[in-house]
């Protein structure tokens, strides 16, 4: 692939960024997918199968009580997760070839991806922690960093960059274009939502739209069709095909945007500013320090707690503006060895516990010296508060460290394309 900015020709299915509108780039995205529809259809089927495998593995890991079985299910889930990344990498490679007027088979777009897996995963991970930490600190900086680094994973495939150079490459290409890209991503999202939810409306009936609980976590909500008629498996199927479709559409769109920006701006890298790294690291370490008392308190509780059996009662719900109700707290009543009756109200909800019928026996741990202090005897309910604090602290710290060690790089003059 040439190291110079590409000139548009009759075979190319992309245009310069300044020479086309958002609608043009979305249209080019669909042209690429339709040009090689057998390959993208196969990739879609693979993503769909992986989604179902991941769902049932995760669901099984939450339901079983055997630690070795849980570990095996989590390992299999991780393998499925890696296969999903390989599939999206194959989609980027296919779009790269097809956008230049070429053709490629499923086998062809999968060949050689194992050598790009580590840079791709690392770039994705760094983008996630940087964007998440920005969203935690302030919403607008989170959006700026997310859009500015959104083409990094594409650069690891289209130009064979390492993770650090791919991040700097994305920051360079998106400089001065983040607002335009935000509008483009918004338009693509709206188009995808219409396409994804049209079959859902046909199945569930129009116009029965309302907010409903999304399985398997009752605490999550999603705008869906036919709340009164939709069953959990219906949402699983809808979200599976919608997620697979959205994944392919987004990675192809990013490839088109990447080439459009490269056609205008050519080669170059641009490091990120360093002050966000210092701020994220400091706040992350502070959050981790605040989580230590939570760990010690939970450790002391589990060491002295008494196990009993409680009874699941009606969950605490909240009415939505759309006329439905959403569970947001699990409630269990229990009686101590001395006959005292107490109630637990947990902010966590979990499939296999929170969604059981009223009256279901639920194991409970309580402090014999202070029986009002109790927790549902499942790992998430016991350690969930500590995990939330730790995850936030780790993500902020990792974001800062990632910026220090990976994102501050010098500009280099050239890039190389990936062989088809």
Image (cartoon, grey):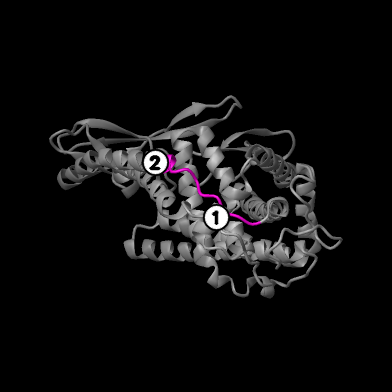
Structural distance between the alpha carbons of marks 1 and 2? 24 Å
Residue 88 in sight = yes
Residue 323 figure quarter: top right
Identify which residue is drawn at 78% across, 42% down: 21
Q: Position of residue 143 (x, y in %)?
A: 55, 38
> Residue 44: x and y, percent?
67, 61
Height in image: 388 above or below 112? above
Q: Position of residue 352 (x, y in %)?
A: 42, 48
10 Å neighbourhood of mark 2: few (<14), some, or many (≥20)? many
**Residue lying at 73% horizontally and 39% vertically, measured from the top left:** 205
Magenta span main SS? loop
Q: Which residue, given by chain and number where applicable, does mark 1 sit on?
A: 411
- Secondary structure under the numbered disc 1 in the rendered image: loop
Closest to the observer: 341 or 195? 195
Residue 217 appears in the picture as rendered: no
Instruction: Tell me if 177 is positioned left or right of 285 in this view.
Output: right
Residue 74 appears in which quarter of the rendering? Answer: bottom left
Rendered position, 252 above or below 224: below
Q: Label 2's element?
A: helix
On screen, 191 above or below 267?
Answer: above
First in sequence: mark 1 vs mark 2? 2
Magenta region: 267-278
Query: Which sits in the foreground, 331 or 380?
Result: 380
Q: Which residue is mark 2?
A: 280
Q: Nearer the viewer, residue 389 or 344?
A: 389
* Quarter of the image where the N terminus is located: bottom right
Q: Quadrant of residue 4?
A: bottom right
Q: Quadrant of the C terminus?
A: bottom right
């Amino acid at each position: 692939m040439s190291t110079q900015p590409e000139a548009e020709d009759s075979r190319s299915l992309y245009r310069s960024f300044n020479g086309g509108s958002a609608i043009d780039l979305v249209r080019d995205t669909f042209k690429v997918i339709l040009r090689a529809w057998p390959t993208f259809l196969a990739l879609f089927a693979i993503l769909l199968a992986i989604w179902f495998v991941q769902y049932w593995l995760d669901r099984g890991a939450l339901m079983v009580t055997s630690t070795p079985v849980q570990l095996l299910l989590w390992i299999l889930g991780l393998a499925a997760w890696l296969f999903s990344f390989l599939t999206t990498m194959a989609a980027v490679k296919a779009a790269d070839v097809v956008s230049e007027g070429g053709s490629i088979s499923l086998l062809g777009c999968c060949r050689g991806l194992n050598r790009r897996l580590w840079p791709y995963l690392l770039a994705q991970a760094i983008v996630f922690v940087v964007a998440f930490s920005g969203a935690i600190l302030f919403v607008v900086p989170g959006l700026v960093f997310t859009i500015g680094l959104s083409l990094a994973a594409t650069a690891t495939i289209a130009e064979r960059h390492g993770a650090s150079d791919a991040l700097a490459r994305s920051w360079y290409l998106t400089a001065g274009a983040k607002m335009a890209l935000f509008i483009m991503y918004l338009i693509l999202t709206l188009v995808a939502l219409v396409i994804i939810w049209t079959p859902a409306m046909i199945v569930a009936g129009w116009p029965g739209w309302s907010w409903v609980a999304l399985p398997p976590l009752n605490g999550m909500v999603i705008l869906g069709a036919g709340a009164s008629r939709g069953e959990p498996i219906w949402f699983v199927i809808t979200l599976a095909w919608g997620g697979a479709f959205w994944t392919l559409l987004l990675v192809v769109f990013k490839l088109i945007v990447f080439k459009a920006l490269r056609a205008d701006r050519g080669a170059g890298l641009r490091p990120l500013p360093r002050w966000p790294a210092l701020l994220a690291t400091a706040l992350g370490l502070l959050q981790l320090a605040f989580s230590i008392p939570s760990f010690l308190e939970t450790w002391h509780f589990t060491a002295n707690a008494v196990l009993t059996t409680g009874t699941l009662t009606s969950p605490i719900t909240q009415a939505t503006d759309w006329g439905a109700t959403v569970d947001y707290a699990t409630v269990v009543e229990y009686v101590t060895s001395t006959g005292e009756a107490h109630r637990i109200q947990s902010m966590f909800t979990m499939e296999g516990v929170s969604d059981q019928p009223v009256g279901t026996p639920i194991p409970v741990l309580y402090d014999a010296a202070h029986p009002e202090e109790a927790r549902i005897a499942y790992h998430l309910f016991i350690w969930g508060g500590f995990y939330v604090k730790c995850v936030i602290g780790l993500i902020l710290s990792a974001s800062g460290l990632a910026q220090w060690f990976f994102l501050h790089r010098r500009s280099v003059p050239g890039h190389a394309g990936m062989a088809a």
